[in-house]
Amino acid sequence: MIDTKTLISKTAVGKRVGELARTISDDYAGAQEVILVGVLKGAFVFLSDLSRQLEIPRRIEFVAVSSYGEEPPTGEVRLLLDLRHRIAGEHVIIVDDIVDTGHTLAYLQRTLRAREPASLRTCVLLQKPERLEAECHVDYLGFEIPDVWVVGYGLDYKEQHRTLPYIAEAKVPGDPYRE
Ligand code: IMP
Ligand code: MG
């Protein structure tokens, strides 16, 4: 087990998720339906809490993506699990856990935009601004964090700590971005 230190408490996360849900509910008031596209696995806790507090008609869908894991990293992304339904003409919100280099999000935004949804926005819980490389756009952001490896609330280090109820900084040996 690795050492962890609380970075954002359960209370602070809960409060911010509630605020995001209210903002999104206001912005989409009157929309017939919104499709929330959760990015597996990391977004599952955030999506679950966020979606249950929305006050608009919504549907839940999932995609799964993976980086190619090349050395050196190329920023290439692969779609492992696609949507089950067409999204043309629909209001779509991508929901993800964290924007790091932004390559995953840039890829998803390109891919989903090409399917001509009525609108496409992105809601992300965490972003590490110092690490951003790709061109992507975040409409709803929970917290900006420094360049540290974080776990909990859906985020993992080697599949550990995803179900911590708060966000913690993990003291990981070596370079977690390469593992
Ligand atoms: P990006 O494509 O570099 O923005 O990477 C996005 C993905 O990398 C996220 O969806 C996470 O799965 C993973 N990731 C990046 N930083 C962290 C972290 O600090 N903790 C856990 N996962 C992370
Ligand atoms: Mg993710």
Image (cartoon, grey):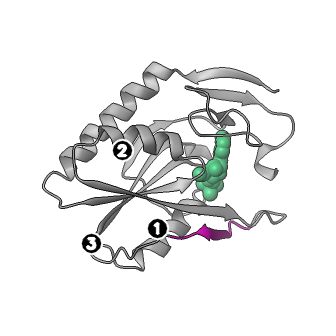
Q: Residues within 10 Å of mark 2 (few under 14, many from 20)?
A: many
- The residue located at (27%, 72%) in the rendering is 118
Please report whichever mark, 2 or 1, sits nearer to the chain's N-terminal start: 2
Report the disc number at residue 51.
2
Q: Residues within 10 Å of mark 1 (few under 14, many from 20)?
A: some
Q: How crowded is mark 3: few (under 14 residues within 10 Å), some or many (20 or more)?
A: few
* Magenta segment boundaries in residue numbering: 74-82
Report the disc number at residue 123.
none
Q: Eyeballing the image, is 84 above or below 47?
A: below
**Local SS, label 3:** loop
Q: Is mark 3 within 8 Å of ligand 2?
A: no
Q: How many marks?
A: 3
The mark closer to the camera, 1 or 3, is 3
Residue 30 point in image, percent of width and height:
12, 55
Closer-to-camera residue (165/175): 165
Residue to which mark 3 is pinned: 118
Q: Is residue 61 magenta?
A: no
- The residue located at (27%, 75%) in the rendering is 89
Picture quarter containing residue 114? bottom left
Q: Eyeballing the image, is 17 above or below 99?
A: above
- The residue located at (31%, 33%) in the rendering is 19
| C-beta proximity under 8 Å, tags 2 and 1 | no
Horizontal relation, residue 17 to residue 170: left or right: left
Residue to which mark 1 is pinned: 109
Q: Does the magenta stretch include residue 77?
A: yes
Residue 148 point in image, percent of width and height:
68, 35
Q: Which amino acid does label 3 sit on?
A: Ala
Q: Does the residue labelled 2 lie within 8 Å of ligand 2?
A: no
Distance from the alpha carbon under mark 2 to that under mark 3:
20 Å
Residue 122 point in image, percent of width and height:
40, 55
| C-beta proximity under 8 Å, tags 1 and 3 | no
Horizontal relation, residue 36 to residue 149: left or right: left
